[in-house]
């Protein structure tokens, strides 16, 4: 087989990073189930009982896969090259995720993240910034870490109570069985689905910026610690109120309805753009700092040096 024919079978060549849409310019997510996904040129071809659709590979930040998906190797390769995060879910929500390449070759965010989480003073400053985002109109200076955690716990408890009263939906607390998702009440099922969608989006943003999902600030010790940190900034805005509202209307197809409303609010409230901004503020990194491609050589306590240059000993001419 000639190289030309082989290239036609492979489709379009792997795009350069600068050719891909930025994080803030992409759609949030699409949910697919009971379908076969293949590749045609630079598009994903999704075939199910209702027909065939084409999806430009770089259109979305996240593709969420439910049960009954048949995915080809070429399609997965295209997704990875496009910097898209793939989330495999069961009925109870997030099960496994895989992400494509980061949308920035610069590791400025990752270096700063490692610096912050490993320095107690910087770590505490970043944690305070995260709590300040939850309480923008209050002065938190002087509160201990334990007091901040207590304040956040009270805030979330109050939100659940207020939404329960507002929509007339009984609330006995966050209660669900991952091994028997359908046994949960409608509002808990809606919360689980909404959280899973939000976790997928946050994972995609974090990975696209080149950060590590496992190096969290408030949450630590888990592979998605930072994901839980960032997602908690927006749950009270788009997940909790909508879960109670939908549960008050009907339990019919509440999972599908929840995915649709979360996707709508992610767009209307510009959540993805805000995530990028908030993450940059928490870690004290400007978005522009991550745009330039720069490979450098570590030089101890001195400023790093440019790579690609042969450095000779000082006494060698």
Image: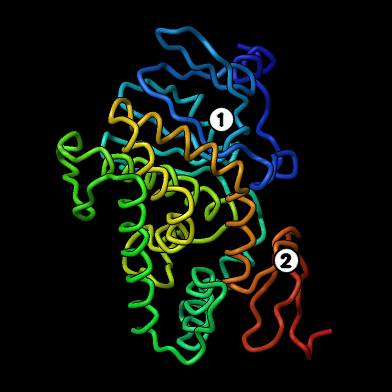
Looking at the rendered structure, the secondary structure element under dot 2 is helix
The quadrant where residue 250 appears: top left
Which-is-in-front pick, marks 2 and 1?
2
Q: 10 Å neighbourhood of mark 1: few (<14), some, or many (≥20)? A: many
In this view, the residue in front, 76 or 287, is 287
Using the image as rendered, state which of residue 94 and residue 301 is in the foreground: 94
The percent position of residue 142, horizontal first and vertical second, equals 47, 92
Q: Residue at x 50, y 25 (%)?
A: 75
Looking at marks 2 and 1 on the same chain, the residue that comes earlier in the sequence is marked by: 1
Q: Is residue 133 above or below residue 69?
A: below
Position of the N terminus by quadrant: top right
Task: Give the vertical position of 206 relative to 260 (above or below).
Answer: below
When asked about the image quadrant of residue 54, the answer is top right
Identify the image quadrant of residue 57. top right
Residue topped by disc 2: 289
Q: Reply above or below: 272 against 291.
A: above
Q: Nearer the viewer, residue 237 or 74?
A: 237
Residue at position x 75%, y 65% from top?
308
Q: Is residue 104 left or right of residue 48?
A: right
Query: What whole-number distance in Å separates the C-alpha atoms at marks 2 and 1?
Result: 28 Å
The residue tagged 1 is 78
Residue 29 drawn at (x, y percent): 52, 36
The total number of labels drawn is: 2
| Quarter of the rendering occupied by the C terminus | bottom right
- Percent coordinates x, y for residue 131 in the rendering: 48, 74
Q: Nearer the viewer, residue 181 or 3?
A: 181
């Amino acid at each position: 087989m000639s190289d030309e024919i082989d290239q036609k079978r492979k489709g379009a060549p792997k795009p350069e990073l600068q050719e891909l849409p930025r994080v803030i310019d992409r759609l949030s997510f699409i949910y697919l189930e009971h379908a076969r996904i293949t590749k045609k040129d630079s598009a994903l071809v999704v075939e199910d009982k209702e027909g065939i659709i084409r999806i430009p590979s770089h259109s979305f930040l996240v593709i969420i896969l439910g049960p009954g998906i048949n995915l080809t190797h070429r399609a997965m390769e295209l997704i990875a090259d496009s910097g898209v995060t793939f989330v495999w879910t069961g009925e109870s929500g997030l099960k496994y995720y895989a992400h494509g390449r980061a949308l920035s070759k610069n590791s400025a965010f990752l270096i700063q993240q490692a610096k912050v989480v490993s320095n107690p003073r910087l770590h505490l400053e970043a944690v305070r910034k995260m709590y300040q985002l939850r309480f923008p109109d209050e002065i938190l200076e002087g509160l201990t870490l334990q007091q901040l955690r207590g304040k956040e716990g009270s805030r979330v408890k109050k939100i659940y109570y207020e939404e329960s009263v507002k929509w007339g939906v009984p609330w006995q607390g966050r209660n669900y069985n991952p091994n028997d998702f359908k046994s949960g009440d409608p509002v808990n099922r809606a919360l689980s689905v909404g959280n899973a969608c939000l976790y997928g989006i946050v994972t995609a943003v974090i990975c696209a910026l080149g950060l590590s999902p496992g190096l969290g600030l408030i949450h630590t010790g888990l592979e998605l610690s930072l994901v839980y940190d960032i997602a908690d900034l927006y749950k009270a805005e788009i997940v909790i109120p909508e879960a109670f509202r939908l549960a008050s209307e009907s339990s019919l197809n509440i999972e599908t309805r929840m995915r649709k409303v979360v996707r709508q609010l992610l767009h209307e409230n510009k959540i993805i753009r805000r995530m990028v901004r908030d993450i940059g503020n928490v870690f004290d990194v400007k978005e522009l700092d991550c745009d330039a491609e720069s490979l450098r050589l570590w030089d101890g306590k001195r400023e790093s040096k440019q790579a690609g240059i042969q450095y000779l000993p000082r006494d060698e001419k």
